[in-house]
Amino acid sequence: MKQHPLYPALGGLIFLSLLFFLNFTSRIIFSPMLPVIEMEMGIGHVQSGSFFLFISAGYFISILLSGFVSARINHKRTIVLSSVSLGLALFVLSNCFTLATLQGGLFLLGLGAGLYFPSALATISSLVSPAYLSRGMAIHELAPNIGFVAAPLFCDIILVYFSWRMGLTLVGVLIVILGVIYGFSSVGSTEKGTAPDLSASGMFFRMPLFWGMVVLFSLAICSTIGIYAMAPLFLVNDHGMDSGKANTLLSISRIAAIVMPLAGGWFGDRYGKQLVMALILLATGILTTAMAMVGNGSWLIFLVVAQPLFAVCFFPAGFAVLTNLGTPKHASVAVSLCLPLAFLIGGGLMPTLIGLIGDLYSISAGFVVMGSLMIAGGAISLFVTLIMTGKNDTVAQ
């Protein structure tokens, strides 16, 4: 029987996906732990939200510099360095007893995490033939979506029998072991990376549409990672749930979202990528605002589950638009510049702002503010898209 062309690459793809799963989980695992950490350390919501700001700041710097690292030591060694750095950072964090040391450890965690992604994408491109590259990327992208589901369940188990510090240590040990095994395996790309093209970066920084995409991606990342990060505090503090029930609901809310990006990609190809981006962001903003305004009961559960179903659909269309901003030669530059900025804003600054509003008013009020910004961003994007579509139709006639 004829072998499927993707089959020889499956071992490498699964190995990379495991590393990506642990890489991503190590960054979001603090979300379901926040209520316990707040209580133990006596910190407020704004300090809790700053956890993700420090992770995002480290990630921002690291992903920008990852090209210089992989250009020196190759992609495989960069992935190993990322995994070992993450494990050591988690071990350091498990032994931090002050807010300042925690924030420093979280910054180191972000630095380690950011090295992985560019080298992983280059490795997948070398493993998989161009005709099956989208499917190879899809297998790899299952990892963060599974991480959203697994992290709260893992914390539920750990917090029953151990402490949050032991949970960080276990994840750290596991990612170091897998990283070292990957380094000694025959899987991976020994090719060296390419340092960033500074002239191309300047071209994008002068492009208004690029900054528009940074804003939209920031709001979209806030709608997924930012809201996820603060959801346990929202459910525990504002709605009186115990941590176990809140984490279970958070996990359930992400199960269906695992496959929803496929629907988002189909709608983008069918109805227009910019139109779908705008409508998804608008709908997500409405659901986020509604989630913050309902009381306890079935409506709260429905909205907590429905919000991420829409939120994750933004990215297939968003990446397609982003990679077409410049010439094909510079497609990866647009992604490598936009994503770190968007993660810093949407995954760092916005959760911190939610925490600040939470200390002044409530986490629900912070969700209303963020949801309103998503609605505004989606509405403006929809307005611009409709105007541009109208102009194109006029020109065609």
Image: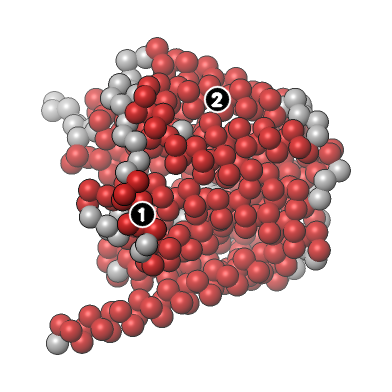
Query: Residue 39, located in which quarter of the rendered image?
Result: top right
Is the C-beta separation of discs 1 and 2 under 8 Å?
no
Label 2: few (<14), some or many (≥20) within 10 Å?
many
Q: Give the residue displayed 44% in from the left and 37% down from the top.
A: 65
Q: Pointer 1: residues within 10 angstroms few (<14), some, or many (20+)? A: few
- Measured from the top left, where is residue 393 in percent x and y? 21, 83
Quarter of the image where the C terminus is located: bottom left
**Is 2 left or right of 370, judged from the image as shown?**
left
Pick the residue in front: 101 or 235.
101
Label 2's element?
helix
Q: Is residue 192 above or below residue 133?
A: above
Say which residue label 2 marks.
85
Among numbered discs 1 and 2, the one appearing first in the sequence: 2
Residue 2 horizontal side relative to residue 195, left or right: left
Residue 202: image tag: 1
- Please provide percent x and percent y for residue 346: 56, 56
* Nearer the camera: disc 1 or disc 2: 1
